[in-house]
Image: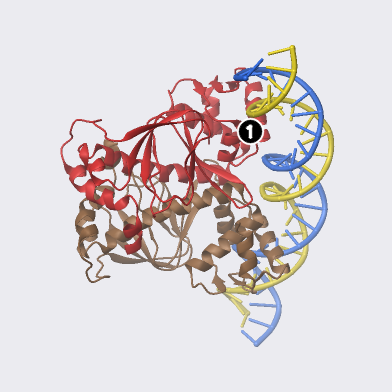
Chain colours: A brown, B red, C yellow, D blue
DNA sequence: CGAAGCGTTGAGGTTTGTCAAATCAGGTGG
DNA sequence: CCACCTGATTTGACAAACCTCAACGCTTCG
């Protein structure tokens, strides 16, 4: 246990920053420190095994974090959208790789910099802890999806989840390719495509010609599939 | 974000307990507070949606934590073996159910009791944070398994993982049924049985007649399958 | 010894994956 | 502005992995 914390790239900082932060009165939010940087589509942000030096917040665009098997099979753990924090991990090395899905702007925070976390009255620290906890919850729900849901249900869950994270509107923008979706949902691109087509034929969704957005015509039906 | 911490059953306590703990010199370990309780096989420990009041450490036996879909499909998130801490979650309600797999003894800690965590020089607090972080890592690896591995590979990963967690010996005790294994690996009991049988025919493992243990005859071959 | 429950095995079906080809959207150069 | 090229997506035919249903065997326990 000792080692878990001792070797954590972030946790020591958190442990130091949180106490003051978590119980101090609210201060003005959003005076964040952190440099910005733009990434082009498919550009690597960090790789599995890299030493953890930073964590990140999406300003615009989208990011995928994933793991690879030795033979190239890929599992995309999560897509990170504007406002999301990612790159927060235990250990001293990244257990994931991260790439920009599209052209993306990130805010970069130095993981070892304790003052970054404490600086804004703990607001960032709270966000980081929240990111970690929400990451865990998301992972748990995703295990249910991967282990027990059909292709249709996976697509439905994915679309519902995206719509809730984005606008809440009925028109969803898909920054990622079918291959990305497939590797996130544990399917093949063909199965993704077929499931989407099938849902369209049933009138549950509409697929505009650019293929990079989805309109939820019948969210209730989708939610029913989400089980 | 505010709400994440505000509503966390455990995190406020952690936030308070950790700072002193994480940076103070080591103290005598294991002067734990916490009551003990025995559970019989299949007895419920807590249910999804229950208000979080405690967290738990396995003293003996085994525990499964799982989620259900509305139609009864089950995904077992994890098996918890002696020494493991479980029941640590964000939010104010359990997002899992927990049951004893076999007759099990647990040490029960009150989640809201800050002094419990600080009491032993932060040793327990470190354990709890470690449990949370390891839970996240385990979940991430498990997503790869569920999304991208074949039945054989899943069984191999499962056996390797169990052997590493238990003795490290080549003889593994399986406290859980085939149904439990299936619901953990995203398979059916028949597929689990067939994969085990196949591995036995290939001489990679041996299955004693009681069916509740496995002998790893060729761990290297298993590890190769683990990819 | 017999019943009950778990685990294994078999036959056949379904879903999803594989391979290949056609289509489509978007960008390029004329 | 249009023809063409390129890569992504869709579609089809087929195969494979896994699931379902059912029967059987084995262990355990009363």
Q: Give above or below for A175 relative to B9.
A: below
Residue C8: where, in percent of width, then height? 69, 25
Q: Give above or below for A175 relative to A184.
A: below
Residue A8: where, in percent of width, then height? 29, 44
On the image, which quarter does residue D22 sit in?
top right
On the image, which quarter does residue B37 sit in?
top left
Q: Is residue A176 visible?
A: no
Residue C1: where, in percent of width, then height? 74, 12
The residue positioned 46% from the left and 46% from the top of the image is B140
For the N terminus of chain A, give its image quadrant: top left
Left or right of residue A11, residue A212 in this image? right
Residue receiving disc 1:
B192
Q: Give above or below for B60 relative to B72.
A: above
The residue positioned 61% from the left and 39% from the top of the image is B150
For the C terminus of chain A, give its image quadrant: bottom right
Observer-nearest residue: B63 or A6?
A: B63
The residue positioned 64% from the left and 51% from the top of the image is B71
The residue positioned 50% from the left and 67% from the top of the image is A164
On the image, which quarter does residue B29 sit in?
top left
Residue that sits furthest to the left in the current view: B25
Left or right of residue B163, residue A178 in this image? right
Q: Secondary structure at mark 1?
A: helix
């Amino acid at each position: 246990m000792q080692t878990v914390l001792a070797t954590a790239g972030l946790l020591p900082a958190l442990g130091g920053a949180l106490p003051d932060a978590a119980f101090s009165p609210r201060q003005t939010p959003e005076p964040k420190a952190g440099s910005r940087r733009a990434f082009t589509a498919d550009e690597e942000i960090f790789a599995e095994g890299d030493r953890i030096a930073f964590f990140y917040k999406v300003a615009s665009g989208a990011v995928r974090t994933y793991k690879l098997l030795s033979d190239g099979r890929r599992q995309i753990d999560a897509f990170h959208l504007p406002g999301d924090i990612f790159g927060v991990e235990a250990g001293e090395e990244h257990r994931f790789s991260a790439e920009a899905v599209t052209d993306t702007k990130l805010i970069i925070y130095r993981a070892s910099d304790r003052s970054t976390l404490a600086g804004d009255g703990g607001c960032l620290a709270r966000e980081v802890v929240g990111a970690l906890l929400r990451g865990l919850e998301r992972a748990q729900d995703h295990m249910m999806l991967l282990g027990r849901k059909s292709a249709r249900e996976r697509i439905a869950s994915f679309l519902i989840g995206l719509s809730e994270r984005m606008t809440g509107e009925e028109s969803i923008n898909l920054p990622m390719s079918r291959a990305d979706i497939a590797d996130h949902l544990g399917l093949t691109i063909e199965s993704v495509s077929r499931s989407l087509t099938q849902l369209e034929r049933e009138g549950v969704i509409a697929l505009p010609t650019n293929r990079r957005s989805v309109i939820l015509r019948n969210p209730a039906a989708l939610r029913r599939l989400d089980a």
